[in-house]
Image (spheres, rainbow, N blue to C red):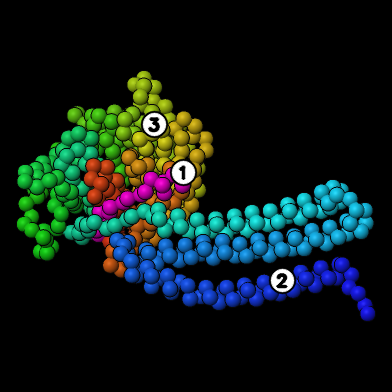
Amino acid sequence: MPVESGNSAAARQVKQKRKSHSLSIRRTNSTEQDRPGMQRDMLEGQDSKLPMALRSNLLDLFGQIEREFENLYIENLELRREIESLNERLAGEGQTVDGGDLSKGALKTKASHSTSQLSQKLKTTYKASTSKIVSSFKATTSRAVCQLVKEYVGHRDGIWDLAVTRVQPLVLGTASAVNSIKFHPTEQMALTASGDQTAHIWRYMVQLPLPQPPADISASLDDDVDFSDKDEADGEADGPNECPTIRVATTTLKSHQGVVIAADWLVGGKQVVTASWDRAANLYDVETSELVHTLTGHDQELTHCCTHPTQRLVVTSSRDTTFRLWDFRDPSIHSVNVFQGHTDTVTSAVFTVGDNVVSGSDDRTVKVWDLKNMRSPIATIRTDSAVNRISVSANQRIIALPHDNRQVRLFDMNGVRLARLPRSNRQGHRRMVCCSAWNEENQACNLFTCGFDRQAIGWNINIPALLQEK
């Protein structure tokens, strides 16, 4: 009668154990199919303030975690059985060969090698499965909230620019027939740039009713600079139109030989800078209307200009793919730095509260620069559409990017995408978005955008701190 060797008997035993275990795995998976339904039924019977969609999403995530750990547990049991059978076989061979101690020699080497392989396999499987689950869980729990608050309509043409006052009462200014609008840092004055080769300074007076809290008031700037939320021809206004109409500017600034595309106030509000298609930027004295400096050097038309909120610094951008930094902090020395980092028109370059400059371009990129070392950008944001006049939140340091493709995206200063403003047939912009402006004084409506669809939109943006730190 033939007798089985020790090796063949051990192999058959391992094979039988694998077969019986595979059957048990199939039975486990078959019973798991009904488990989510049972858990949902139990969940529906419990009292909770969470919405049913969120509870269902959490249930699915926890179900994935449970299944992953259960599979790991089953695989661990199977590997442990294989290790035990291997140890039994090696123990038998060790006794017949040399009868030595099982913790020494070749047996110790083989056992440690097998154990390290098992440990590495368990770590790899666990890390791959749990990282996927944790990332999906983060995506559902730390989302930015972007809600449309109000739509400002009344213009008969596209809106090029908009701005918000820095002092009370809060006023929203929109520029349609003019190219830009900026409010004085402390007084009720507005600076506009126009296609008639001039810039104008307007004085206005806005008084809100005492019983009501401060609210946003839309200031529309057409040819006659009408500070009203609705156009007079639009009879669908919510209430009587009591906003004044300003038809005569306080000051007219003339020196350019081309379209004045942008203008801004220097810190303190005693001087203004204008940018023109004549390839020059001019610095004016507000009180005397005199030309103080002419900033030349760009090879093509200028597209934008911006001033630093606390220092006498000016940045101008141009179609020549560059932007220039002009330093007026020293009255005797006016230095200029040229920065080349884009491959197409630089549509805008703006300062942040810190020591950074953010530039946007038609080359579909946005670059963040450090004023102390501007040889190369510290962050680059690549998008799928040309970028127009950007803005940076002073409090949250979030960059709002208006695009030609009707989208508005939010990024942090490290170039990490935070959110995209909702857009559909019922809400959002329907044509190119030209400009964005943050409102730091009203958190209920803290971002404004405007576009060629002849409307400005106020948004409520709430970015969780956890999402900004990612």
Residue 453, quarter of picture: bottom left
Whether residue 467 is in magenta: the answer is yes
Give me the residue at 25% from left, 59% from top: 454
Q: Could you tell me the amino acid type at mark 2?
A: Arg
Q: Find out whether the residues at labels 1 and 3 contact each other: C-beta distance under 8 Å.
A: no
Q: Could you tell me the amino acid type at mark 1?
A: Asn
Up the image or down, 306 lies above or below 149; here it is above
Circle 3 SS class: strand
Give me the residue at 28% from left, 38% from top: 264
For mark 1, what is the residue? 414
Q: Position of residue 215 (x, y in %)?
A: 15, 48
Q: Which residues are magenta?
A: 454-470
Q: Is residue 440 visible?
A: yes
Is 128 left or right of 325, judged from the image as shown? right
Give me the residue at 41% from left, 38% from top: 357
Could you tell me how far apart the alpha carbons at marks 1 and 2 are, in whole angstroms? 52 Å
Of labels 1 and 2, earlier in sequence is 2
